[in-house]
Image (cartoon, rainbow, N blue to C red):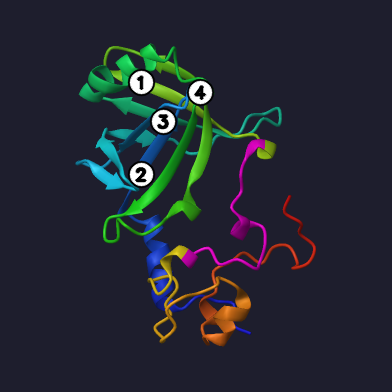
Amino acid sequence: MKTSLPSEVNVVKNKLEGETWFYRVHMLFTDATSVYFCNDKQTFTYGGNDYLPIPFTLSSLKSGTGGELPTRTMSVAGQAVQSFLTPYVRAKGGVRSAVVTITKVLYEQPALDMSATAEIYKAVNITISDDAMTIKLGFVRLREQQIPIYQYTSVRCRVLSEFKGTLCGYAGGDATCEGTPEDCISKSNYARFNAERGLTPGTLRLA
């Protein structure tokens, strides 16, 4: 049974490691207010939300010496700090415990659902100066993390919402897909079944 992805699918996945993508960020405050921004040069619309262009950089993950969960830093500089982020953050009393979701977006396929690559953090602290803002991001505690079912079981395809899309690759006559291995096998498309080889079927109970 084949387990490797077709070459054309690997091309799309490998683009995540190049310079053909940007980040979109959803910052959810504790009062359920949301802020959306991206580090592209123009406003990016996705899922009915406008992500404002705000230049920022992300550090690599840094681990502590005492067994702490890794953290990374988001650094924002320029006019956007004073005109948008600083007033908003101060009005909310800071960003501590805000949930920050960072997702990559492919320039060539901006509508492609890349939620499977999303990284979810909690804002730990923030430093603000006249023209810069630094937000320290820590991982959400694992027992608070809501993990998509396709990441821990092998019976649900992660690209079901993109049926017949690039990562799915099915080009047959069926108009629907159940997202299961059996349905993928019946379509002779199992080589492209997108699910982690996780828990064995029959051993997982969803409450």
Q: Give the residues in magenta.
A: 144-160
Give the CA separation, mark 1 to mark 4: 20 Å
The answer to whether marks 3 and 2 mark residues whose Cβ atoms lie closer than 8 Å is no
The answer to whether marks 2 and 4 mark residues whose Cβ atoms lie closer than 8 Å is no
Q: Disc number at residue 98?
A: none
Disc 2 or disc 4, which is closer to the eye?
A: 4
Q: Which residue is mark 1?
A: 133
Eyeballing the image, is 58 above or below 153?
above
Secondary structure under tag 1 reads: strand
- Of the residues under marks 1 and 4, which one precedes in the sequence? 4
* 48 with respect to 124 (left or right): left
**What is the magenta segment's predominant secondary structure?**
loop
Characterize the local packing of mark 3: few (<14), some (14-19) or many (20 or more) Cα atoms within 10 angstroms: some
Q: Quadrant of residue 56?
A: top left
Q: Which residue is mark 3?
A: 74
Secondary structure under tag 3 reads: strand
Residue type beneath disc 4:
Thr
Q: Which residue is mark 2?
A: 23
Q: Disc number at residue 30?
A: 4
Residue type beneath disc 2:
Tyr
The answer to whether marks 3 and 1 mark residues whose Cβ atoms lie closer than 8 Å is no
Characterize the local packing of mark 1: few (<14), some (14-19) or many (20 or more) Cα atoms within 10 angstroms: many
Disc 1 or disc 4, which is closer to the eye?
A: 4
- Of the residues under marks 2 and 4, which one precedes in the sequence? 2
Give the CA separation, mark 3 to mark 1: 8 Å
- Residue 184: % across, % down: 55, 79
Q: Is residue 155 magenta?
A: yes
